[in-house]
Image: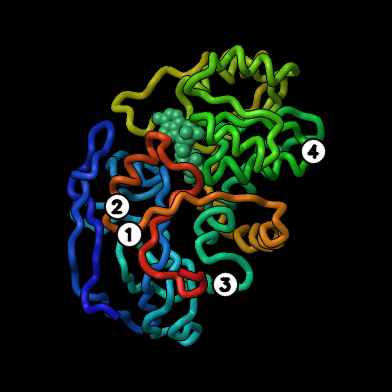
Amino acid sequence: MENRNRQVLLKRRPTGVPTPADFEITNAPLPDPADGEVLVHGIYLSLDPYMRGRISGQRSYARPVEVGAVMEGRVVGEVARSRDQAFREGDFVLGGYGWQLYSAVSGQGLLKLDPAEAPLSTALGVLGMPGLTAYVGLDEIGKPQRGETVVISAASGAVGAVAGQLARRAGARVVGIAGGADKCRWVEAELGFEACIDHRSADLGAALDRVCPKEIDVYWENVGGAVQHAVFPRLNDFARMVMCGMVAEYNDVDPRPGPNLMSVVRKRLKIQGFIVSDQWQRFGEYRAMAAPLLKSGELKYREDMVESLERAPEAFVGLLQGRNFGKLVVRLGADPTRPA
Ligand code: NDP
């Protein structure tokens, strides 16, 4: 075990597009776990779009990260010391905290991981919070039916890839929207979506008309912006819009005008937002459903692995511009369960 803790702190609140200079990389003493706590040595750190909200200081559903504090984030790691009887040194866990190599956290918030069940890093993506997001959003809001057309934005991403695959399993015809030809190829060839439209190069409206001849019954909203404006007029009567996120607008200083809402009345649309943390009680149910599908290869995923904590700020900035391809994960240290 090292005797210092490498950390990334929030240095200042960015206005508009964040830059790596908004963060500071520093050393701190190793944390000392209190009674009931566990010292987690991080192996993988999750970077997620929600973190843009946490550094903005605006009122939201969760408290912001304070300036000078360690950046928030979920970590998969190995127990380095335990003062909770339920955990032993060497256990693999989900629930370490923050952009740092070590964290002392309460044993109560930890989930023990079995590396024989699935690769450890998947607990941050396809078998983690993003996967659960896709599951509950579809189950409670989207409710795709056999033969319906479902459109998924940010389709190659952590949430979008799972949402689309689950909608396919429900018998829907699934169309993705993603940034770039490589992402679209993967969404079609690997995830098996009916089609995928590149929002950067295509005339989005015309492309949607071509691949959604019966228009759209469920729209999974991950990005907002121009994509939302192209999809909205193409929603069918009684369509459902699953408001998961609007990452294309997270760096905006002023909110953009949205689509005119009269069609919500005319078409009897359902537009509903949700926050996955209201649904943690369904995490076990989701993992029990998804882990066997992952093992059998029926549920596909892709990770974008960034080597080392030092590169986390730059990778996070890139996430908000679509530079990641798959679930963005930072490798904090060696994974003893995987060959080097
Ligand atoms: P992704 O892995 O999908 O990565 C983000 C993707 O968003 C990028 O790869 C890019 O995809 C797209 N994107 C980023 N910036 C822009 C931009 N400026 N314009 C257009 N597209 C952009 O992230 P997640 O799957 O983790 O998250 C997807 C969405 O789900 C986010 O909005 C996030 O906030 C939301 N979310 C909501 C939750 C909830 O509880 N409601 C929980 C978890 C996530 P591309 O290049 O294909 O456009």
Find residue 176 and report its horizontal and vertical position in percent: 61, 31
Q: Name the residue carrying label 3.
A: 115
Q: Name the residue carrying label 2.
A: 311
Q: Name the residue carrying label 1.
A: 308
* Cα distance between the residues tagged 1 and 2: 6 Å
- Are the residues tagged 1 and 2 within 8 Å (C-beta)? yes
Query: In front: mark 3 or mark 1?
Result: 1
* Cα distance between the residues tagged 3 and 2: 26 Å
Compared across the picture, whether 328 is left or right of 128 comes to left
**Residue at point 62%, 46% (across, down):** 162
Find residue 280 and report its horizontal and vertical position in percent: 56, 57
First in residue order: circle 3 vs circle 2: 3
Q: Name the residue carrying label 4.
A: 171
| Amino acid at pointer 3 | Pro
* Cα distance between the residues tagged 3 and 4: 31 Å
**Residue 240 in view in this figure:** no
Which color scheme is applied? rainbow
Q: Dividing the picture into quarters, in which one does residue 36 lie? A: bottom left
First in residue order: circle 3 vs circle 4: 3
